[in-house]
């Protein structure tokens, strides 16, 4: 699992938007356009998959035994 | 006559009067409304002022110990309620109000403190729009400075998880009310910046009384938010609650839940956006393919590709014409040359030896066919060949006929 899914998502999204702009520009040769289309479709699929599989990661900063702050998993057990 | 025993010293009389004041229960705990004038804060920390109304005035003092609880700064002209006891200041022989609490008349003292601080920080530039930072479109790590217990953090986590579960939430647990709260909140904000902990901060707490929310009006919190390199969303209380933090923050959320909504994109919208982008991709490619196809069609319908034989026929026709022209040219040339030949032949004919022969001349040659052009040459030969116009005869050489006779030059 990538460390920062949000970063990957943003990068994919940015690239996808760029691809759409290039394709809509019209000056791209057909062969390159088909490659861009394939890349864009793969990116969109990847973004959807990231969202499908994501689960919010929650940590809490707590003072460790040495006094420094450490991340520990945080269970949000407050009733809804 | 004055009875000696009835003469008081000043101190005695003042003490008597003071005792009289101190024995009136109504004066031990009074609340008086008036306007502050002649206000002085001494370096001792004691406050001295006069309360006035239209007709009278009352000396007041507020000692340092009581003044420490003041949330606002008393000012001349301010209408206040002063609570305290009335007693006598022996040194001056003057009665005065020993003020234990001072409350702004009308608005509460907290409101007064809020207004004053807000004005001061505003003037200092802490609320400047130019200083506000842009929030990230896709926060990768969100620092939440709040109490780890309670509904507020629960609501925020639920909404963040529902909208954008790709992010990571780092909870910085702090107390959000009481004496220590402001310091803890300010330190948590500073810590997040020092450690570059996240790319977005949410600072707040759930609803409560004005006093409960007060930490978010404190100056250390305001300054920590202002100093934060990480963009800050303030999320304090309910919709109507406004704190100093809200003014300093880069974005004010009405509630903690609202902060979570403002912090991250909604995955439903992201999915819609993704599908729209996919449609745009497909449409763009289709347009491009159509464009290519119509160009191909245009090429196909060009005569060259549509009916290649035309081209050959055309070329063949060109060839025919060229050949024809070539033959013509050649014929012309032959014709011209033939004329020339005829002309030359005529000239030549005029000079032909045969023509000479036909006029009665003959040529003389030896047996080898070499022309013999003199009598001297002929005398050396046994025989000679004489060619006439119509044939050649052989003749023998017998001798000189007449040396004098010369055949005349032709």
Image (tube, rainbow, N blue to C red):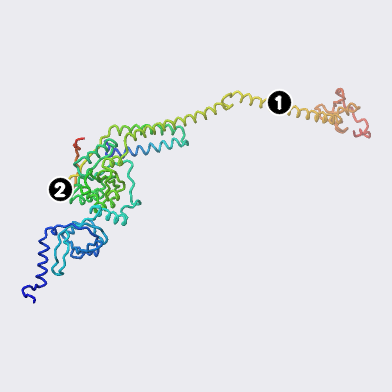
Kindly identify which chain the residue marked by label 2 belongs to.
A
Instruction: Give B32 or B372, whichever is nearer the viewer.
Output: B32
Kindly identify which chain the residue marked by label 1 belongs to.
B
Residue B260, horizontal then vertical, whole percent: 28, 40
Q: Left of B186 or right of it: where is A17?
A: right
Residue B350, horizontal then vertical, whole percent: 87, 30
Q: Does label 1 lie on the same chain as label 2?
A: no
Instruction: Give B150 or B115, whichever is nearer the viewer.
Output: B115
- The quadrant in which the C terminus of chain A is found is top left
Mark 2 secondary-structure assignment? loop
Direction bottom: furthest residue: B1
Mark 1 secondary-structure assignment? helix
- The quadrant in which the N terminus of chain A is found is top left
Residue B307, horizontal then vertical, whole percent: 58, 23
The image quarter in which residue B139 lies: top left
Q: Left of B407 or right of it: where is B95?
A: left
Up the image or down, B104 lies above or below B168; here it is: below
Mark 2 nearby-residue class (10 Å; few <14, some 14–19, many ≥20):
few
Residue B303, horizontal then vertical, whole percent: 59, 26
Instruction: Give B337 or B189, whichever is nearer the viewer.
Output: B189
Residue matched to label 1: B324
**Distance of label 2 from label 1 (alpha carbons):** 110 Å
- Identify the disc placed on residue B279: none
Residue matched to label 2: A66
Mark 1 nearby-residue class (10 Å; few <14, some 14–19, many ≥20):
few
| Residue at screen point 47% across, 35% down | A26
The image quarter in which residue B164 lies: top left
Instruction: Give B87 or B303, whichever is nearer the viewer.
Output: B87
């Amino acid at each position: 699992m990538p460390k920062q899914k949000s970063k990957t998502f943003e990068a994919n999204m940015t690239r996808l938007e760029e691809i759409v702009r290039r394709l809509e520009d019209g000056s791209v040769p057909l062969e390159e356009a088909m490659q861009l289309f394939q890349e864009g479709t793969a990116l969109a699929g990847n973004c959807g998959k990231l969202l499908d599989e994501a689960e919010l990661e929650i940590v809490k900063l707590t003072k460790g035994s040495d006094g420094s702050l450490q991340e520990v998993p945080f269970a949000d057990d407050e009733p809804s | 006559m004055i009875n000696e025993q009835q003469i008081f010293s000043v101190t005695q009389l003042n003490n008597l009067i003071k005792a009289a004041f101190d024995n009136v229960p109504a004066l031990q705990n009074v609340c008086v409304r008036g306007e502050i004038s002649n206000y002085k804060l001494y370096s001792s920390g004691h406050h001295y002022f006069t309360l006035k109304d239209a007709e009278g005035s009352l000396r007041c003092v507020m000692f340092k110990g009581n003044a420490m609880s003041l949330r606002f700064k008393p000012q001349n002209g301010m209408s206040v309620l002063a609570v305290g006891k009335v007693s006598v200041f022996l040194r001056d022989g003057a009665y005065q109000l020993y003020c234990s609490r001072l409350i702004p008349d009308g608005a509460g003292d907290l409101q007064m403190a809020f207004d004053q601080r807000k004005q001061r920080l505003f003037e200092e530039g802490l609320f400047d729009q130019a200083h506000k930072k842009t929030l990230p479109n896709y926060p990768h790590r969100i620092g939440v400075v709040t109490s780890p217990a309670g509904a507020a953090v629960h609501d925020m986590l639920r909404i963040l998880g529902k909208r954008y579960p790709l992010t990571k939430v780092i909870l910085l647990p702090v107390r959000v009310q009481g004496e220590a709260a402001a310091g803890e909140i300010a330190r948590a904000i500073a810590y997040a910046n020092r450690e570059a902990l996240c790319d977005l901060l949410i600072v707040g707490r759930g609803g409560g009384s004005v006093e409960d929310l007060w930490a978010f009006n404190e100056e250390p919190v305001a300054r920590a938010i202002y100093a934060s390199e990480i963009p800050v969303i303030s999320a304090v209380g309910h919709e109507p609650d406004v704190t100093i933090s809200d003014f300093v923050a880069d974005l004010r959320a009405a509630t903690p839940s609202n902060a979570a909504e403002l912090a991250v994109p909604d995955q439903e919208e992201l999915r819609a956006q993704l599908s729209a982008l996919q449609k745009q991709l497909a449409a763009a490619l289709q347009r491009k393919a159509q464009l290519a196809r119509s160009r191909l069609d245009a090429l196909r319908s060009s005569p060259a590709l549509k009916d290649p034989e035309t081209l050959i026929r055309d070329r063949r026709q060109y060839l025919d014409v060229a050949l024809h022209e070539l033959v013509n040219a050649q014929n012309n040339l032959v014709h011209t040359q033939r004329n020339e030949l005829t002309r030359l032949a005529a000239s030549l004919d005029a000079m032909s030896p045969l023509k000479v022969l036909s006029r009665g001349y003959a040529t003389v040659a030896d047996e080898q066919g070499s022309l013999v052009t003199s009598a001297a040459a002929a005398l050396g030969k046994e025989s000679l060949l004489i060619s006439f116009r119509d044939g050649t005869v052989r003749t023998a050489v017998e001798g000189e006929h007449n040396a004098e006779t010369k055949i005349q030059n032709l």
